[in-house]
Amino acid sequence: MLLEPRLVKLTTRTGIEISRTLPNAKKRMIGAWAFADHFGPTVQADGMVVAAHPHTGLQTATWLIEGSIEHRDSLGTIQHINPGQLNLMTAGYGIAHSELSLADANLLHAVQLWIALPDSARDMAPAFQHVEYPPKVMLGANQVCIFAGSLLGKTAETTLFSELVGAEVRIPAGEKITLPVRDDFEHGFLIVQGEARVAEEIGLTGQMMYRQPGTDSFEVTAGSENLIVILLGGRPFEEPIVMWWNFIGRSHGEILEMRRAWNARENRFAEFPDRIGKWTPAPELPNVILRPRK
Ligand code: MN
């Protein structure tokens, strides 16, 4: 099944539109992967300037294809991230962060993913992890970089709270790769560059190819240009969640309280200095009761 992206301009971002494949009308989550945003490629003049904003109940995973970003958060973290590295921010009960493209690279090309935290972890203290050298496997001319979970016998040190896999797969034009996967996982192939064929289905840049559980291996073939896909997989996430703006909760009442605490600038989300110097108020809630969705 092909998941089509939609273009979104976020309240927290200026300059660029992003391409979102999760949540999708056809599929809300893949395992605990709850958000998949694809930025660029774009020149840095239209880079990322994301002023301080909060998160709850989720992890953000930032992965760059090109560019360089400065992350700052309310734990006091200041972390530059470059291609091939992972920034993993665990919001838990509450965190605030900002992101700024650095001008020393010409292009920005990135994905930002959200991982829903299960009930057992969602009220934990916030945390931040920078994974500088995620494991890499070369299979012929193909390169697989594992940034979450295990694949091809390698395990990322990324801290997770549910069973997941995440990897960047690079396949030169016309080449193919066979990826053994867990058959109890559902999977998505987010195409960030080029054209991919998985079984008899073709996916284009920006699209995500979805596969339900029940397969223990995929053959992925690149089209006429070098292919980069982000593989996301996990055990289907059984807890119904409520997602609104930058928050993941379990009920309308929880979201209401998260929104109130952020807009009142309470210390659930501590303040921190950055070079952007603004913060992003939460928008008005829609005039409906937010309900959990699976
Ligand atoms: Mn964020």
Image (cartoon, helix red, strand yellow):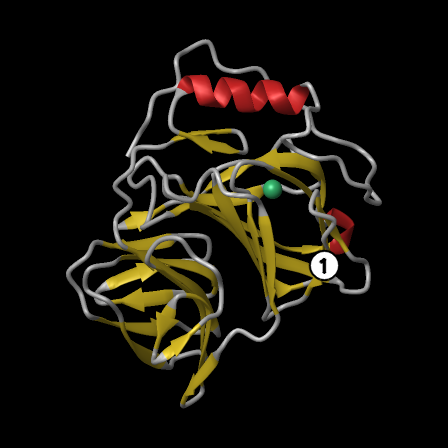
From the viewer's perspective, tell me whether residue 274 is left or right of residue 260.
right
> Residue at horizontal 33%, vertical 74%?
221
Residue 42 makes an appearance in the image: yes
Task: Read off the residue under disc 1.
Answer: 79
- Looking at this view, is 281 or 59 the one in front? 59
In the image, what residue type sits under mark 1?
Answer: Gln
> Residue at horizontal 48%, vertical 80%?
136
| Badge 1 element | strand
Q: Where residue 240 sits: x, y (%)?
A: 30, 33
Splitting the image into 4 quarters, where does residue 108 fall?
A: bottom right
Q: Where residue 179 sits: x, y (%)?
A: 30, 75
User: Most extreme residue toward the top, as rendered?
Assistant: 287
From the viewer's perspective, tell me whether residue 82 is left or right of residue 156.
right
From the viewer's perspective, tell me whether residue 212 is left or right of residue 31.
left
Q: How many marks?
A: 1
Q: Is residue 25 above or below residue 143?
A: above
Label 1 Cα crowd, 10 Å radius (few <14 / some 14-19 / many 20+):
some
Q: Where residue 288 sits: x, y (%)?
A: 41, 11
- Looking at this view, is 61 or 15 the one in front? 61
> Residue at horizontal 74%, vertical 49%?
76
Q: Is residue 248 above or below residue 154?
A: above
Ligand 1 falls in quadrant: top right
> Residue at horizontal 33%, vertical 35%?
25
Residue 282 makes an appearance in the image: no
- Looking at this view, is 226 or 262 the one in front? 262
